[in-house]
Amino acid sequence: MIILETRGLKYTYPDGTAAVQDINIEIKKGKKIAFVGQNGSGKSTLFLLLNGTLKPNEGEILFHGAPIKYDSKSLREIRKSVGIVFQNSDDQIFAPTVYQDIAFGPANLGYSKERVDACVQQAIEQVGLSRLKDKPPHHLSGGQKKRVAIAGVMAMEPEVIVLDEPLSNLDPVGADEIMDLLNEFNQFGSTIIISTHDVDLAYRWSDYVFLMSNSKLIGQGTPVEVFKEQELLKKTGLRQPTTLEIYHEIERRGLAYGKNSPKSIPDLVNTLKPLDLMWVEVPPGVREGDNLNLGVMYGEYATHSPYEAVNATVLHIHPDGRAIVELKRKGIKAGGVLLYDTDSYSLPEIRQILKDGEIAFVGAMGKKSKTLAEQDGIRLDVTSGVIDKSILMALCGKRCLILTTGGMVDHALKRTREYVEKSGIEFTVGVVNREDGCKWTEETDSNPEAFKV
Amino acid sequence: MTNILDDYALMSPLRHRNNWLKLVIVLFGLLVGVSSTSPITPLFIALCMSFTTVALGRAPLKLYLKLLLAPVGFALTGVVIIAFFSGSGQELLSFNLAGYPLSVRADGLELALLVLSRSLSGMCCLYFLSLTTPMIELFAVLKATRLPESLIELSMLIYRYIFVFLDMALSIKYAQTVRLGYSNFRRSLNSMGMLGSTLFIRSWEQGDKLFLAMNSRCYDGKMTLFEVHRPVRAIELLLTSVYFLSALALFYFTKNISII
């Protein structure tokens, strides 16, 4: 279903600079959209057009198939439905306290006092700022201000959230938290539109990408399609995403194979060809054509490898005693990614899981889960880029537990399952404290699944 | 970062108490302190208010004394002059300074002490308010006093943007300093001028952006202010009444007492 659409959109600033020209886009409901382009390519102006703040000189904008009208009642409707988060939080947060700023939108919609309070409480909890609600904004950090700005928009319960450069001026942890938040909103059905010049982010995160350059739309498609086009990227003054670039270089050297473009580090790792041949020291008396079991020895060559080399065939013995062997491998043990929904949280249960499930790696996503873990002294190995890291650890045969909550549980589950499906590497995935959860702890002794390489 | 008084008020545990109660306490202190005829009552009030601010309001003692130093120093100079140049009663102390006879008389000293204690009690009352009640709590009070809505809205916006512009001014000043903008007097004047004009233009732009931001959240010309309901608790009421009664009693019994 198409939620937002523009037709022949054109806007020129009063001083004569053309900000956007001839923009035709269709945005589908529930998608994650990224507008990518350099500074000054017209992204911000387009966003202001999308919620009716600016009126186009030519063309029209359709919301749910009906053209936006510019009388004050229709504008209220569209601004309630399309929330916009500005690049600089200080431009957006103007009330003296966090609570009052978030309450500004719902109050303007004419809600009753109780309803405003309910909206604010919900939004403030979602962004994890309940403790700071009476603080003045100048006492907050950049990341916290950004979350206040997002909560201020969320409190109006918009269908589409538009964020102009949501990660500018944020540190990596703060940026991760914002992205987690956006993923969660998306999981609940909101359409998210961001603008960015960070190609890595757009490539990794979005479902659909629009490329903008010099106030024009010059390309669109899924991230894989768009970022494959080197020429197009050059025209916009952008570079290829790092993972893709690394993948191409590795592929060119014949060390990777696979047709799809890897999006994340786990995807990238999955394209790597395992070593077929390697130099090993062999005991005297071994002849060419013999079979060797390197099982234990292999540990010396690759200590963190998830594989065990069985039945290495000796192909050639060098005069100095070393030999070239061809390896056949088998996974040592299957790892897994286990999710724990902190909505129904109990510390003894987690301790039990950590002990019985032989969990080697614990991560937390979302402010609430992190705070819980901190309070109860659960050691967290990772708090940012949690899903990717957990998949990587699972690939190495470790068992990971991710503490998370609400919509992020489904998001993490979906991401991990997708990976298992796409890569063909099997490891256990499931939510431990849900009814249809996985019976992980009982499986501990069962046979490890082989890695399909 | 520099802490301003408002920051201490924000961190104070008394911030979350009823604003009206605090205002009544302050008003009471001011009125009783000023109308008292002996220095004992104002001193009692000053002591109580200081204790509340520092012990219950958790204002740092060092900061509090430093804050008091400025007005007290000012009051002291005035008091010395009053002590020497007014009154007519019994002579307590006299000497010649460069040929001029100077003397302190009993009722002059009495008056001086009264002035000192009154100003001290007034200061302590006001510091109690400013160190336990941040500006953001006072907006609700302002609203209840039926000041025009637009005035309150403006003051809320101004309060917020003071800090934005303060940050901006500091970073501009820093940028100027590292490029030797304040190396001599002439350059300092020049840099100051640039700082001022840049701030003016920036605040103009900020106004535009603010309007945009408010508009995109359906601004319809009215900012709603949500007052947090904070009931007065029994223990607070009790303490306040004890304080009020003892101050009034002191006021009554020291009416005609002179300490010298």
Image (spheres, grey):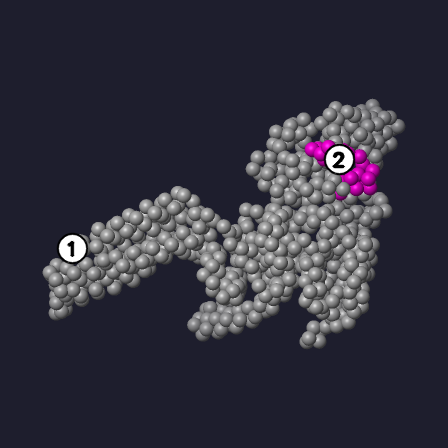
B199 or A93: nearer the viewer: A93
The amino acid type found where label 2 is placed reads Val
As drawn, the residue found furthest toward the bottom would be: A15
Which residue is painted at 68% across and 67% down in the image? A72
User: Which quadrant of the figure has residue A58?
Assistant: bottom right
A60 or A67: nearer the viewer: A67
* Residue A26 numbered mark, or none: none
Residue holding disc 2: A429
Query: Label 2: how many residues lie within 10 Å, few (<14), some (14-19) or many (20+)?
Result: many
Image mark 2: chain? A
Alpha carbons under labels 2 and 1: distance apart: 88 Å
* Residue A433 highlighted magenta (yes or no): yes
* Residue B260 numbered mark, or none: 1
Are both tags, 2 and 1, on one chain?
no
Q: Can residue A246 be seen in this view?
A: no
Which residue is painted at 18% across and 66% down in the image? B85
* Residue A39 highlighted magenta (yes or no): no
B205 or B98: nearer the viewer: B205
Tell me the magenta residue range. A415-435
Q: Position of residue A370 (x, y in %)?
A: 61, 41
Label 1: element kind: loop
Label 2: element kind: strand
Q: Position of residue B219 (x, y in %)?
A: 62, 63
Q: Can residue B143 be seen in this view?
A: yes
Is B237 rendered above or below residue B148?
above
Q: Position of residue A209 (x, y in %)?
A: 78, 56
Quadrant location, the C terminus of chain B = bottom left
Q: Position of residue B156 (x, y in %)?
A: 51, 62
